[in-house]
Amino acid sequence: MSRIATHKAPMDAAGSPMPGEPAYLAVGKIRHAHGVHGEILMEVYTDFPERFQPDEVLYLGPETGQLRLLKCRNHREGLLLTFDGYTTPEAVGELRNQVLYVRTDDRPPLANGEYYQHQLIDLSVISDEGVTIGPVTEILETGASDVLVVRPETGPEVLIPVAGAFIRNIDLDKREITVHIIPGLLAEES
């Protein structure tokens, strides 16, 4: 079984979002101005902070303006960014508390067996015995591994670790995740 991993930050082979995928992905939140030359601190959401390179275009939202990145450098609390046209703390301060996005079709490719979290949301979870459990409604990030939150039609939510012992197959085309159910995982088995 290949390694299974999920990534926060999100296409088909043509470069378009898959059905149900967002057109834009949040990569960070702008916090406050830093220094006197127009730098601003960004809280990082993406698993790929190395993506921030000069001339990259970032978005303040799907319906709002574009920002061209001039410089990016590490800071203990995130990344310090400098944008074209923002040369003073006052100017860059207008961006404060806004979320930065990238286009979904501009996301980095993942290795085999790795998925963006948004790709798994709403996929149908089916046991390896063919029983439909329900859709994935959320992914919890824990220290050991991510956990799929599955909402059956009746009963409590089911928590399934994203680990090889539980995840048998993820088929994005069929929009299904096949899982191995161990005793006690489902409420009726408790």
Image (cartoon, rainbow, N blue to C red):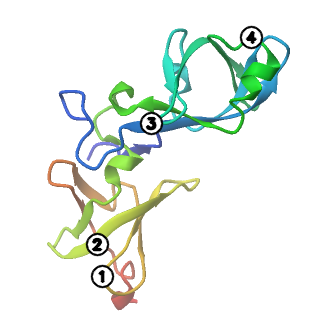
Q: Secondary structure at mark 3?
A: loop
Q: What's the amino acid at mark 2?
A: Gly
Query: Quick one: label 1 or label 2, which is nearer the N terminus?
Result: 2
Inspect the image, locate mark 3, and give the three-letter code of the amino acid beneath it. Answer: Pro
According to the image, label 3 marks what residue? Answer: 62
Other residues around mark 4 within 10 Å, as few (<14) / some (14–19) / many (≥20): some
Pointer 1 or 4: first along the chain = 4
Q: Looking at the picture, how far across and down is residue 149, in whole percent?
A: 42, 67
Q: Quadrant of residue 32?
A: top right
Q: Residue at x 47, y 55 (%)?
A: 146
Give the residue type at disc 1. Glu
Q: On the picture, is 68 further left or further right than 181?
A: right
Q: Could you say whether the residue bearing mark 4 is in a helix, strand or loop?
A: loop
In the rendered structure, the answer to whether residue 170 lies left or right of residue 99 reads left
Tag 3: Cα neighbours inside 10 Å, few (<14), some, or many (≥20)? some
- Coordinates of residue 18 in the picture (x, y in percent): 24, 42
Q: Residue 87 has which mark?
A: 4
